[in-house]
Amino acid sequence: AQSVSQHNHHVILSEAASLELGCNYSYGGTVNLFWYVQYPGQHLQLLLKYFSGDPLVKGIKGFEAEFIKSKFSFNLRKPSVQWSDTAEYFCAVNSRGSQGNLIFGKGTKLSVKP
Amino acid sequence: DTEVTQTPKHLVMGMTNKKSLKCEQHMGHRAMYWYKQKAKKPPELMFVYSYEKLSINESVPSRFSPECPNSSLLNLHLHALQPEDSALYLCASSQDWGQDYGYTFGSGTRLTVV
């Protein structure tokens, strides 16, 4: 079955530090990849998505992600985090293997210290 | 209108009550979804409706009963729930059901079963 792995459960950074959150998926065919953010007490918001084309995707709030097909990875990056980036981050994938359904990773909690 | 609207935002119900959650979108999306999210866990797919027909039921107990009265509305009828059903219930929609479409999520209904 298709699965999504986020290896970091909780990441703690100071403001202005650089961020990289890992995401790996298990499906070998064509995939669409997403990063969602969930601020405390709020709903899921789409940060960025990859369907095809340039594997380096830029999203909102200064986030970007790189799709590396050979590594089955879609890591999220931000050069300089802010306290307001404190949130839960979910990687998600859909594919023919999931019948188009969105499968989420377990999430990574990011805490940014002011 | 680029939103998915869910009502109510909060709901407390007893184990013998019957209640309904409502989801509405006016983006012309033809696929709608119910997800369940427990605290500190990723969203888990419950149901998929495509063109107002139930396409996927992820082995959800019959005390949860979805309904799609028209292409803009998706309801989730609740009856005889258990305390472990307490969770955030998320509705989402996409242009169509399949691999090539991103999802828009609503803000969710936070359900507490007492």
Image: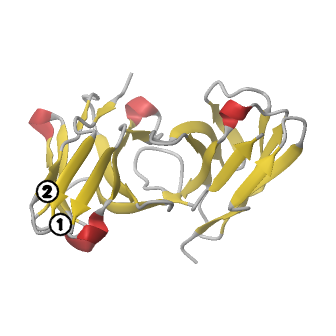
Amino acid type, callout 1: Val
Residue that badge 1 annotates: A81
Give left or right: position of B40 versus B91: left
* Marks 2 and 1 close (CB-CB < 8 Å): yes
Q: Distance between the residues labelled 2 and 1?
A: 7 Å
Q: Which chain carries label 1?
A: A
Estimate how packed mark 1 is, as few (under 14), some (14 to 19) or many (20 or more) residues with alpha carbons within 10 Å. many
- Pick out the residue farthest to the front: A114
Where, by quadrant of the figure, is residue B71 drawn? Answer: bottom right
Label 2 or label 1, whichever comes before in sequence order:
2
Label 1 secondary element: loop
Residue that badge 2 annotates: A19
Is the residue at mark 2 from the same chain as the one at mark 1? yes
Q: Mark 2 lies on which chain?
A: A
Where, by quadrant of the figure, is residue B2 drawn? Answer: bottom right
Q: Which of A84 and A37 is in front in this view?
A: A84
Q: Which of A96 and A5 is in front in this view?
A: A5
Label 2 secondary element: strand
Which residue is at 18% across, 35% downward? Answer: A72
Quadrant where the C terminus of chain B sits is top right
Quadrant where the N terminus of chain B sits is bottom right
Total marks placed: 2
